Amino acid sequence: MNLLDISWRSLIAGGVFAAAIPAVAAEQIATRTVAGVDPAELQKMIELNVRPTAIPFPEENPYSVEKAELGKMLFFDPRLSGSNLLSCASCHNPSFGWEDGQPTGAGHGMNRLGRHTPTVLNLAWGEIFMWDGRMDSLEEQALGPIQADVEMAQPLDELIAELQAIEGYRELFAAAFPDQEISEETIGQAIATYERTIVSNRAPFDHWVDGDETAISESAKRGFVIYNTKANCVACHSGWNMTDDSFHDIGLDTDDVGRAAEMNDMPEFKHAFKTPGLRNIVERAPYMHNGSLANLSEVIDHYAAGFAERPSLSDDIKPFELSAAEKDDLIAFLESLSSEDDPVEIPVLPN
């Protein structure tokens, strides 16, 4: 997909969000040091974590201030659900890292869903969506939960009629899509445009990468090295957003076949789920596709030795041993990925 980039500064000027200072280029990264680690090897690790300087928007759905503002309205509006009680933000709550803080999500009628609510943070860089990868675009993902019977349970034709009856929404859609009617396509494009602006701010780890030796603790620096070497987290959680955007069976005790359901039950995809990014991971407990691990300590214990051996298990999942101090260091690094994001202003909805 060809992408049209838009700088974070222009988004800030447009009033959509106050997210981030553009990152420095890889060649500008200061040489960092960690005791006992070869500087050249450390530099290679660091250079893989350079933040992008622009948010990618697809050519078929370019950014506009009007479109993003409309998308934000829709994202927070419970009238998008059949019950008029659930909005996108009911499950993707900014106070919980754009998740909901529950092991599994709650849908229509407050019935429990089968999977943990994934974050919408940094989805602009995603290539495939949902835990099982059944959505190919953010526009498609935006519409999926609205019409799903177990989630928001709102037929899209009824939603279109409801929005057309609200003068404020007619005006917002006309501003965002001057030559188009309110439709499934324009609803999906507006929500997806807003979701692409949901970007984590620069974290202490980023400031360390840029050259501030005091930005993170010595423990976190050691944890970064463990993440890249002994624990091999980087095998799947790679890049600045700490995800390969791919699917792996990590050995959880589950009957959910995951990606295999979308891949004609191919055995290598059985129990495989999408790798989540790790930005602001501390705020996003509990963890895993089923919310089965309560904290980061439990997550590390699972990867170290707690996984189920089976034919579909990812080749990247191998046991390792960490001392108590090394485990603390790894958690300290993961904590350094949390940014101080500005409070999200809930919009006043049209009526």
Image (tube, helix red, strand yellow):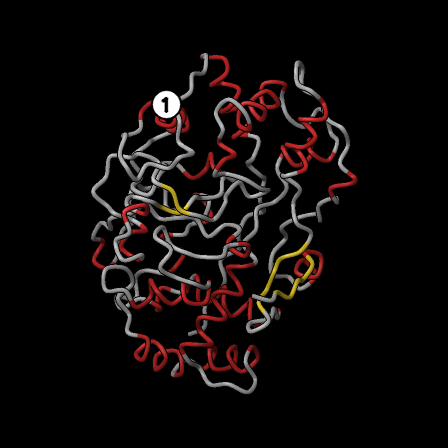
Q: Say whether residue 280 is visible.
A: no
Quarter residue 40 falls in? top right
In the depicted view, which residue is nearer to us: 59 or 120? 59
Quarter residue 338 falls in? top right
Answer few, some or many: residues within 10 Å of disc 1's Cα (few below 14, many 20 plus, some between 14 and 19). Answer: some
Residue at image point 27% right, 55% down: 261
Where does label 1 land, which residue?
A: 301
Residue at image point 73% right, 42% down: 26
Say which amino acid is labelled 1: Asp
Secondary structure beneath label 1: helix
Quarter residue 109 falls in? bottom left
Horizontal side, residue 147 vs residue 278: left or right:
left
In the depicted view, which residue is nearer to us: 191 or 95? 191
Residue at image point 44% right, 76% down: 185
Residue 170: where, in percent of width, then height?
Answer: 47, 82
Q: Is residue 4 above or below residue 231?
A: below
Residue at image point 25% right, 53% down: 265
In the depicted view, which residue is nearer to us: 113 or 65? 113
Q: Is residue 330 above or below residue 175?
A: above
Quarter of the image with the C terminus is: bottom left
Quarter of the image with the N terminus is: bottom right
Residue 113: where, in percent of width, then height?
Answer: 24, 51
Q: Say whether residue 265 is visible.
A: yes
